[in-house]
């Protein structure tokens, strides 16, 4: 079935290149599309080279946006959310009448996308693994191969046939779990990103650096609690992450449970400890990051629901100062959380 599906990965950077390599290797017809001309040129000349926890090189079809032609049955969207209105409006013309746009972005992007292309053409997918763009055409998979998964859900109007088509494509890389509770899956991923990507960007480190530092872990637990409190107030029911019930494991109301949760963090992050936050990757390249679509969303919903979010507020403040060049991304930034945890 996948051989007859025309698919595009729009925003094929680190995650999209890894995904595109696996999909192509296993028989899909997929175009990897990126505005980075050096990256596209390298993909065309040498294929997609994936290293890290795996080692493979796959010849792929790579394009810049101006080279796009025709329409696609499936477009997998992996750009940052900063320009979603502009990007999605453009992609609408490249989507088949019965086609589907699947957002693999962070945060909660589905409602805004559905406003542009309709609920019946919008799906959401949570990515449970990480990667880094190491050089043009070269990506490093930073999660262990046995810990890769997608969690996918659909909005109203998506047919079973459309869902099955996308699921089959993504399964060319790793297991895909259907989420009837897409909002809950989004909040669970938002929690992980808010804590480890947000704090990782604050201190200039990986997920493992956050999990391995006692002071950072203390802040991380407080950040988790805030996100859970806000999500519950917003009506979200958090779903398990790769089989782990994050509420039971990490939510605390007393010092004993907090101490237990603190011990669990390094264990829970063991297979993903090498992930470098995408926001930190952006800052290192001098590009704006999507802090407003991650920790900023938690703060925004906190205000709507009357739940205070001092930890997430501080993370947003620090990262924006890093983005503006007023602060360096370094461990000493943990001093700004004194008195908050």
Image (cartoon, rainbow, N blue to C red):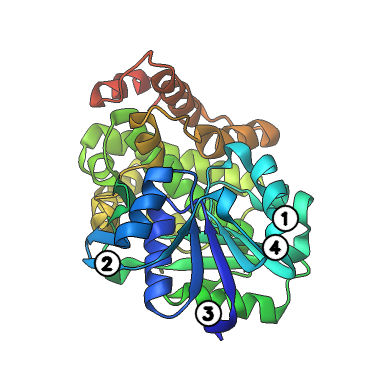
Q: Is residue 244 visible?
A: no
Give residue 57's mark. 2
Q: From the viewer's side, name the closer residue of 337 and 136.
A: 136
The x, y position of residue 273, in whole percent, is: 25, 51
Q: Residues within 10 Å of mark 4 (few under 14, many from 20)?
A: many
- Residue drawn at point x = 31 percent, y = 36 percent: 218
Q: Please state which of the two labelled residues, at mark 1 or mark 3, is closer to the viewer.
A: 1
What mark, if any, has residue 95 been given in the picture? 4
Earlier sequence position, callout 3 versus callout 4? 4
Distance (Cα) linking label 1 and label 3: 23 Å
**Label 1 SS:** helix
What is the spatial separation of the Cα atoms under label 2 and label 4, in whole angstroms?
29 Å
* Quarter-of-image position of residue 7: bottom right
Q: Which residue is mark 3?
A: 168
The answer to the question of whether label 1 and label 4 lie on touching residues, with beta carbons closer than 8 A, is yes
Q: Disc 2 to disc 1, how far (Cα)? A: 32 Å
The residue lying toward the viewer, choosing from 164 and 230, is: 164
Task: Assess disc 1: are there few (<14), some (14-19) or many (≥20) residues with their C-alpha within 10 Å of its C-alpha.
Answer: some
Kindly state the secondary structure of the residue where label 2 is placed.
strand
The C terminus is located in which quarter? Answer: top left
Q: Residue furthest top?
A: 326
Q: Residue at x 44, y 30 (%)?
A: 287
Q: Which mark is residue 45?
A: none
């Amino acid at each position: 079935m996948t051989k007859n599906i025309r698919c595009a990965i729009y925003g094929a950077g680190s995650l999209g290149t890894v995904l595109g390599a696996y999909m192509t290797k296993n028989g899909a017809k997929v175009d990897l599309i990126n505005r980075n001309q050096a990256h596209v040129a390298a993909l065309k000349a040498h294929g997609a080279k994936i290293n890290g926890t795996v080692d493979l090189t796959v010849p792929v079809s790579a394009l810049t946006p101006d080279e796009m032609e025709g329409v696609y049955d499936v477009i997998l969207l992996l750009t940052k959310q900063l320009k979603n209105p502009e990007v999605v409006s453009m992609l609408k013309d490249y989507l088949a009448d019965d086609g589907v746009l699947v957002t693999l972005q962070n945060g909660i992007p589905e409602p805004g996308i559905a406003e542009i292309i309709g609920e019946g053409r919008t799906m959401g997918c949570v990515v449970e693994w990480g990667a880094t763009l190491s050089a043009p055409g070269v990506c490093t998979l930073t999660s262990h191969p046995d810990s890769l998964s997608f969690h996918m859900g659909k909005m109203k109007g998506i047919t079973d046939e459309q869902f099955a088509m996308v699921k089959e494509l993504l399964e060319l890389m790793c297991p895909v779990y259907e989420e009837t509770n897409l909002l809950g899956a989004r909040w669970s991923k938002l929690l992980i990103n808010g804590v480890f990507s947000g704090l990782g960007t604050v201190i200039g480190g990986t997920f493992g650096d956050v999990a391995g530092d006692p002071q950072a872990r203390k802040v991380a637990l407080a950040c988790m609690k805030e996100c859970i409190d806000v999500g519950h107030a917003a009506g979200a029911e958090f779903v398990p992450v790769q089989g782990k019930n994050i509420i039971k494991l990490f939510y605390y109301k007393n010092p004993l449970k907090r101490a237990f949760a603190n011990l669990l963090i390094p264990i829970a992050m063991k297979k993903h400890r090498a992930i470098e936050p995408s926001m930190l990757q952006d800052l290192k390249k001098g590009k704006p990051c999507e802090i407003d679509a991650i920790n900023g969303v938690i703060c925004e919903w906190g205000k709507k629901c009357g739940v205070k979010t001092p930890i997430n507020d501080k993370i947003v403040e620090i990262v924006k100062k890093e983005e503006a060049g007023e602060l360096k991304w370094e461990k000493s930034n943990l001093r700004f959380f004194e008195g908050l945890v």
